[in-house]
Image (cartoon, rainbow, N blue to C red):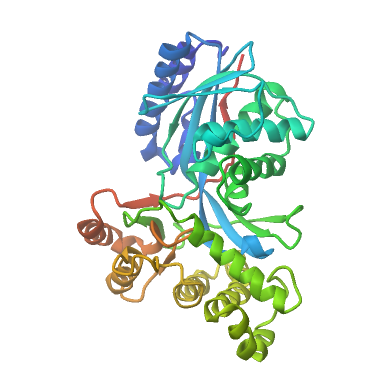
Amino acid sequence: MKQDTFARMREAVQGGDIDAVLASMYGGPESLGEQRSRYAALLKLTEQEFGPGPGMLLSVPGRTELGGNHTDHNHGRVLAAAVHLDCLAVVTPSNDMKVRIKSAGFAETIFVDLSNLSPEGTEAGKPAALVRGVAAGFIEAGLAVGGFSACINSSVPMGAGLSSSAAFEVLVGAIFSQLYNSGSVPTLRIASVARMAENVYFQKPCGLMDQIACAFKGVSEIDFGNPDAPVIEPIECDVESAGYRLAVINTGGDHADLTSEYAAIASEMHAAAKLLGQDYARGISVEQILESASWLREKVGERAVLRLLHFVEDDARVDRQARALRSGNMNQFLKLVNDAGESSCRLLQNCFCTNKPTEQPIPLALALTERLLGGKGAWRIQGGGFAGTIQAYVPHDAFADYVGAMERVFGPNSVVPLHIRATGPEVILPAA
């Protein structure tokens, strides 16, 4: 079948031609009605905005962190997974060097002229900066870029620790790869360019974990011992078959003005590691920290020592979590999840902001979850911390009651169920 217009693509979606793909991506046959409607609406919007086609339909997953909280920026290890919530795009190439992106639900169109790829200070913190940064990264790597028009629909909620910005960056990279590089750009290259765009152009400090998890499929164990060439190992994992439902709970905390809080974690770990003779925390032992604690606390403060201790133990914990998943030992994995969550609260100290001591939605959500689940399942902070979300593994038979109880506190739709997605960036329907 020739996919040469948006109308024909819409017919394919509504006629069930891609039902098998949609079911595998979004958690089963029960998702089909919702996704058919979503895809069809986006195709219709694209036709209204940019004409009849031809075009291409792509999807990039969001991600969730399963292990290794703030370990990637110190050459540590992490566990992460692609999830079914995604950034979906309908794309058509253009004959100029201009990018136009219309996001469903937003009035403003993102516009970027690729003839200028220098960072624009006025774009910092805006999606246009990510587009420009990804394009600049492609050119620097000797790859081709060009203009395109796209409509996107993102089901990755902003501020929920599921990496909506990383999914968007990887999506832009996948578009440039498909349209102007025959789909040949390596996945890790796209992730690395996306991270650079966020750091340099968007001006937000982050490691590479978010982008890798959005660019690769399923569950990944990622070792940043050499951050220029991280080792990425896939893990077969089926949380739902093991009897649990994975979810994140959005507590409604505000992520604004948290950049300094995030940056302080890495800088304090670096400062403490430097005093122990290393530029990064990877390779330092618990014994070294304990032996040096009396003078380390005088040099860098107690919090830096505690954060360094968190790094060393959580980095090692990732390896044990990965082994538990590979062996199918879900009980051991969940115990390690709870251990990691306690370490984030007590040692890493990223569960609330020190400048807003009365606002503690993360500790409240964790405390409620522990009591609601009665010791079953697991719970921990999700992502960077300080505000936003927690993560929970809830037994199937307790899930409905858990959702009801948490949403009475944090509001409707605050509990977001997740399916681990078996595919990474995906061309759903190719260009003609």
Left or right, 411 with reference to 157: left
Above or below, 395 relative to 375: above
The residue under the point 62% across, 18% down is 147
Residue 59 is at least partly visible in this image: no
Q: Nearer the viewer, residue 164 or 111?
A: 111
Q: Give the position of the N terminus as an image quadrant.
A: top right
The residue under the point 26% across, 60% down is 406
Q: Position of residue 63 (x, y in %)?
A: 51, 49
Q: Position of residue 332 (x, y in %)?
A: 52, 74
Q: Position of residue 209 (x, y in %)?
A: 61, 53
Residue lying furthest right: 142
Above or below, 217 relative to 322: above
The residue under the point 47% across, 34% down is 22
The residue under the point 56% across, 41% down is 202
Q: Nearer the viewer, residue 118 or 248?
A: 118
Residue lying furthest left: 408
Q: Position of residue 45 (x, y in %)?
A: 40, 18
Residue lying furthest top: 52
Residue 13 is at least partly visible in this image: yes
Q: Nearer the viewer, residue 58 or 195?
A: 195
Q: Give the position of the C terminus as an image quadrant.
A: top right
